[in-house]
Each structure stands twice: as structure tokens, then as C-alpha cells.
Image: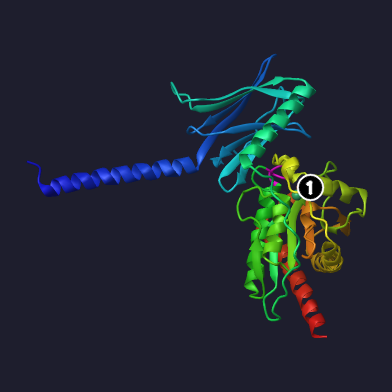
Amino acid sequence: MIGLSTLFRTTLLALTLLSSSLAVTAAESATVAVKDIRLGVTAERTRLVLDLGAKVDFDIFLLDRPRRVVVDLPSLAWPTDQPTVDGLVQKIRFGQFTADKSRLVIDAKGPVRVAKSFLLPSSSGLPHRLVIDLVKTGNKEFADQVAKDRAAKRSAKKAAPAPTPFTPKPRKQANSKPVIVLDAGHGGVDPGALGRKAREKSVTLNFTRELAKQLRKTGKYKVYLTRNRDIYIPLRQRVNIARKHNADLFISIHADAIKRKNVRGMSIYTLSETASDKEAAALAKKENQSDIIAGIDFADQPPEVANILIDLAQRETKNLSVKFANLVVDNARGKTRLLDRTHRFAGFRVLKAPDVPSVLIELGFLTNRSDEKQLLSTAWRRKVAGALVNSVNGFFDASRLAALR
Ligand SMILES: [Zn+2]
């Protein structure tokens, strides 16, 4: 006869086993690994294969301008190496897209059709595989499929989002701490510029964390980050985060890459529809690509709101942005190499909060060996973040004095 205590123990053991196996499943499904990404090219088709640690759901669709094949997946642990591209594939990128979604974006060499896409279950020692076959098609067929995919997405979402109306910032209490929003450029599916070792999205996150730490240590500011992990955030959402926090200052951190490998140094940008020079215009164009790189469909974005209040707020904001940029140039001089004409202007989308003074800082060039070394150095990060803290202090000390007058 089985004693009650034995039965109890057995049940307990079974429960423990059950709960631990459940825990493993939950942990696994949270971070299914992509073990490999491969391309196989024949005359007829280009086949993309993802080796996966488990079965996953996926959603595949096309986008135009530029032509892209987008695959939405749950959060996955992606490989750090970039797969070699071939056939109909010009470029592949992947990474976290939203809190619970990751995304793979394929830039196509021409108009393509997804001939097949399916999951192969793990069998005879092979892992689960996601297989996508791309074949050549015509411009018209490609455009038709884009329209079809877009319509399907719209009906799934029901209504397109309405633009958020502009409401001026509420007045702050005189003794409240200034709010600073720090924005680490790129992230997730958008890696940003690439150096020999460094990737812009990691460089910007590391620097932003250091700057946040130093600013918080002063005890004088409330500091928020637009992202504190490797995740993609649309440009307009970064602006909205700053406005939601009622920010007094928005600092977007980036690092550049350029063909001429000898070019180095830090530069700082404020918003202007007319760029100060050709390089600044090209840079803004490149940084504004972030949403395209991440596979955002602009046709589904709510239009920008036009409003007289925006124009009024913007004028004051622009002056303050320029004031802060000048302080950064003064404080960074001697601490790190500066690009000539360090403060420049261009139409960066991330600087468009009408009522939040905003700057974008390019810390240096990932394509320059000395700059890349610095960008990866903790000591350099500390020193330059310190220069920015001094600039922030100067900025708010001046505005406090102005308020007393
Ligand atoms: Zn950037």
C-alpha cells in the first residue's frame, strides 16, 4: 500500500517537474535562437533559410521605395554575424523591432515575389527551419503585391491612426527639476553605421547610459532614455517620448561613418529645413533612413500636423537648441577632437519636437581607426559625457538666471 506521505511526495515531485518543465518552455519561447541564416542561389530562385531553436509564427510582406521583403517574428536571439548576401538579395538586417516582436528586412535587388515561405519542423538532426523562396518578377506585379499586403494590414488594424494634435507644454512649477531625455540612436533591426568592430547602435547605447548616470549623479535633473536596450524605436516615437515627459532638453546620440577614412571628430546638429552644408544635408538624409531600414511603411503613418502654435513654439525652441549646441562645442573643445565647423544645421526628423530644445550629437566616425578606438573606450566615454554634463549645467544655470531677471 502506498502511504499518504509517499503519495504526497510523488505528487509534489510530479508538480515540481511539471513546473520546472513549464519554466523551461517559457524561457525558451522568450528567446528562441536563430542559429544560422543562409542563402542558396539557383538560376530560378534565391532561398533564404533561418535555422531556429523552436517553431515560431511569422508574417511576411513586401514594401516598396526601396523594395523590401519584411518578415515579422516573435522576439528571437539573433546571431551577431552578418550573413553573406547573394542572388536577389542585396542586404539583410534583423533585430528587435517592438517589445515582443523582432524583424528581418531583406533589401531586394529588383522586383521579387515570395514564391514560397514555410516552416520545416526539426527532423533527423536538423533544426526547425524557416524557408523563404524569392523569384524575379515584374515591376507591376511587385507593386500590386505591395498594395495587396498593405490593404491586408490595414483591414487587420481597422483604422489608420489619427495624427496627435499639438498641445503646448504645460507650465512647470518653478522649483521642479529640469527633464532631460537622452536618445541612443538606432537599435534592434536598425544597426546604424558600421565600423570595423563597433556598431553604431551599441556605441550610442553605451554612451547614453554613461551620460544618464553622470547626469543623475548631479541630483539636479530628471533623466529619461528613449531606449535602454537593443530595440528599434521609430523616429517619430522618439520625439513623442520627449514630449510625453515634458522634456526641457532632448539629446540624440549618434556616430557617423564615411568613405574617407581619415575624417574624424565630433560634431553637433540642430534642426533647420535648409542645411548648413552638403555634408550636413547628406547626414540628415542618412539618419532619417532609420524607419526605412527598419521596414516601416510610411503610407500607414499619420500625417504631420500643421499648426500655427507649432511655428511659434519652434522659433523659441530653435534658439535654445542653438544655445545648447554652442555650449557643447565650448565644453568638448580640448576633451576630444572636433570636426571643423562643429555645429551644423539640417533637417533631422528626430529633432522635430516643436517645443523641446533638441540636438543631435555625432560622437565621431566609426570608419576612422582612432575615433573607433575612442568610441569603444570607457575612459573616453566618461570624459566626453562629463563635458556634456558641464554643457547641461551651463544651459540650465543660464535659463535659471534669465528667469530671475
Ligand atoms: Zn546615426
Secondary structure under badge 1? loop
Q: Nearer the viewer, residue 381 or 210?
A: 210
Q: Position of residue 247 (x, y in %)?
A: 71, 67
Residue under the image location 65 percent in, 34 percent down: 152
Q: How many marks?
A: 1
The quadrant where residue 159 appears: top right
Most extreme residue toward the top is 43
179 or 50, nearer to the observer: 179
Residue 54 visible in image:
yes
Residue toward you, 336 or 130: 130
Asked whether residue 264 is drawn in magenta, I would say: no
The answer, for residue 257, to whether it is visible in the render is no
Above/below status of 347 relative to 243: above
Residue situated in front as seen by the camera: 120 or 307? 307
The kind of residue tagged 1 is: Asn
Q: Quadrant of the C terminus?
A: bottom right
Q: Residues within 10 Å of mark 1 (few under 14, many from 20)?
A: some
Position of 137 compared to 15: left or right?
right
Q: Which residue is mark 1?
A: 288
Q: Residue 58: percent from the left, percent from the top?
A: 56, 33
Residue 80: quarter of image: top right
The magenta stretch is 190-199
Q: Residue 385: x and y, percent?
A: 71, 64
Q: Position of residue 315 (x, y in %)?
A: 87, 66
Identify the main secondary structure in magenta.
Answer: loop
Q: How is the image coloured?
A: rainbow
Residue drawn at x 45%, y 41% is: 28
